[in-house]
Image (spheres, grey):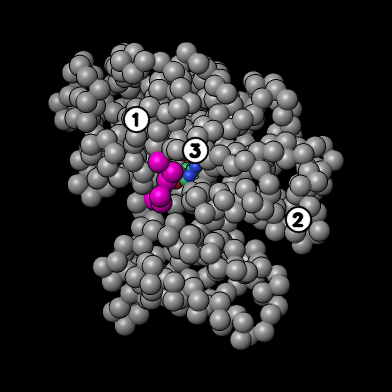
């Protein structure tokens, strides 16, 4: 199903033309209204009029999260607060949160975009949608909430926590679609198994997962344990929130809504734009946002872009599932480690959950890596010998598959505390 056929299936030349017009207007507004951008453009002696093709965008400077933090809270808004009707902020997993604002028109676009996400994941007006993201400053809940209402689905604004109540409501209210992080879906599955609730007795048919990476192995596990169809959707608070890209039924990458955002892939070291298909860091420019437009925002997420046609009929480029964050890649004794590699290993080990924390330190001049992994209730109360076997199994796989030595420490279920609803996957004490 496609929510906005006209804009999601536009011929590619038309997308390019639309992007160019919207880009020129965005750059002009920023030059006029945001001191930060005016200073930057003037310093580089570039004017918005120089944009003749989308490729010219590469001459413009990148915007980093630190730039937003320096302008905290409203310094980078392109309109006075009088025009702003909603304020959100990022989850703050990687430091001080950043603030974003929306005009009435921005909110209208946002609902349209999340309606696209939900429709692509199979949601229709017949669905009962349970939203388990936190209602509050985080963009996840409100963003998807209004898209679901726009479609005409029945929305249950559950918010986070209280797994017992979530499961109860899911049973009683006959929820058909779960909107959550993939790790929360696994936590729900585990709870139901523990309580003897058969997921097949529920009305649940689909899960729309986002806000953190969901590798294929994790998707498979969720689908098998909850007996649902799972799709991935991606977004970044600073750029909008959820509603940047989402998988369709073919699950071969996430269609990125190019009529609202221009994606580029850069090499995170050299900052050069890479050619289509190359893996690197995703950079996004907003095209329709009024209150808080951004030029070439560094998401730090590692992915690649695929412009080949998709059987679903959407002409929008597809970004590969996010592999990890460029600032989460840890280099241990010269070996690059992605947290997603660790996650895939844990999903293969019986009794452990893909909830973990990597701790890197310098011990006597050498890098040392400790991996804390949550195990399920049953394993945690098991004999020491079994726990040692599991640790040894993970340590061996890490050596063989990723090529690093680590000390594995098994911890109690739900003992690794998330920040802003998201797990803290890497703590690198080597960095200042
Ligand atoms: O997580 C917005 C969101 C809410 C997206 C609900 C989807 C669903 P932030 O808190 O600003 O915003 O975090 C953005 O989360 O840069 C990625 O690192 C990560 N992320 C978000 N979606 C995905 C995904 C929201 N589908 C940061 N796969 C991003 C992998 C994701 N990582």
Residue 360 lies in magenta, yes or no?
Answer: no
- Which segment did they paint magenta? 320-325
Label 1 vs label 3: CA separation?
14 Å
Q: Residue at x 20, y 16 (%)?
A: 52
Q: Is residue 279 left or right of residue 1?
A: left
- Given residues 307 and 326, the one toward you in this image is 307
**Residue under circle 1?**
308
Name the main secondary structure of what is drawn in magenta.
loop
Frontmost of labels 2 and 3 is 3
Q: Quadrant of the N terminus?
A: top right
* 10 Å crowding of disc 1: few (<14), some (14-19), many (20+): few
- Judging by the rendered image, the residue that carries numbered circle 3 is 251
Q: Earlier in the sequence, mark 1 or mark 2?
A: 2
Which of label 1 and label 2 is nearer to you? 1
Residue tagged 2: 192
Residue 411, given in percent of the width and then of the height, sits at: 60, 72
Label 2 environment density (alpha carbons within 10 Å; few <14, some 14–19, many ≥20): some
Residue 311 x, y percent position in the rendering: 45, 27
Query: What kind of element bears circle 3?
Result: loop
Work out which quarter of the rendered image holds the C terminus and state it.
bottom left
């Amino acid at each position: 199903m496609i929510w906005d056929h006209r804009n999601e299936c536009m011929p590619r030349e038309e997308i390019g033309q639309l992007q160019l017009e919207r880009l020129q207007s965005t750059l002009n507004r920023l030059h006029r209204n945001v001191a930060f951008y005016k200073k930057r453009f003037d310093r580089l002696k570039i004017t918005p009029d120089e944009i003749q093709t989308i490729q010219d965008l590469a001459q413009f400077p990148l915007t980093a999260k630190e730039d937003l933090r320096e302008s905290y809270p409203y310094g980078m808004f392109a309109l006075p607060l009088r025009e702003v009707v909603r304020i959100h902020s990022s989850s703050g997993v990687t430091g001080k949160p950043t603030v974003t604002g929306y005009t009435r028109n921005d909110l209208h676009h946002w609902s349209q975009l999340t309606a696209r996400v939900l429709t692509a994941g199979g949601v229709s007006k017949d669905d009962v949608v349970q939203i388990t993201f936190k209602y509050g400053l985080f963009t996840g809940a409100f963003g998807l909430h209004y898209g679901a209402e726009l479609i005409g689905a029945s929305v249950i604004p559950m918010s986070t926590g209280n797994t017992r109540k979530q499961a109860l409501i899911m049973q009683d209210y006959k929820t058909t679609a779960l909107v959550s992080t993939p790790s929360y879906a696994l936590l729900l599955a585990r709870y139901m198994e523990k309580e003897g609730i058969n997921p097949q007795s529920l009305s649940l048919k689909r899960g729309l997962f986002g806000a953190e990476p969901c590798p294929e192995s994790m998707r498979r596990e969720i689908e098998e344990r909850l007996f649902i169809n799972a799709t991935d959707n991606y977004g970044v608070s600073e750029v909008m929130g959820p509603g940047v890209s989402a998988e369709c039924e073919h699950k071969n990458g996430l269609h990125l809504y190019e009529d609202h955002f221009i994606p580029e892939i850069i090499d995170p070291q050299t900052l050069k734009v890479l050619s289509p298909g190359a893996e690197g860091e995703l950079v996004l420019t907003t095209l329709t946002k009024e209150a808080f437009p951004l030029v070439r925002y560094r998401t730090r997420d590692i992915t690649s872009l695929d412009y080949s046609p998709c059987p679903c009929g959407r002409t929008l480029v597809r970004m590969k599932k996010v592999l990890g964050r460029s600032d989460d890649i840890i280099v241990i004794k010269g070996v690059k480690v992605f947290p997603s590699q660790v996650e895939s290993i844990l999903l293969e080990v019986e009794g452990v959950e893909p909830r973990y924390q990597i701790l890197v330190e310098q011990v006597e001049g050498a890098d040392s890596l400790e991996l804390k992994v949550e195990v399920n209730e049953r394993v945690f109360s098991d004999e020491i010998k079994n726990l040692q076997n599991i640790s040894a199994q993970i340590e061996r796989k890490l050596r063989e598959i990723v090529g690093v030595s680590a000390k594995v420490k098994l911890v109690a279920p739900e003992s690794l505390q998330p920040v802003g609803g998201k797990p803290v996957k890497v703590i690198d004490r080597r960095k200042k």
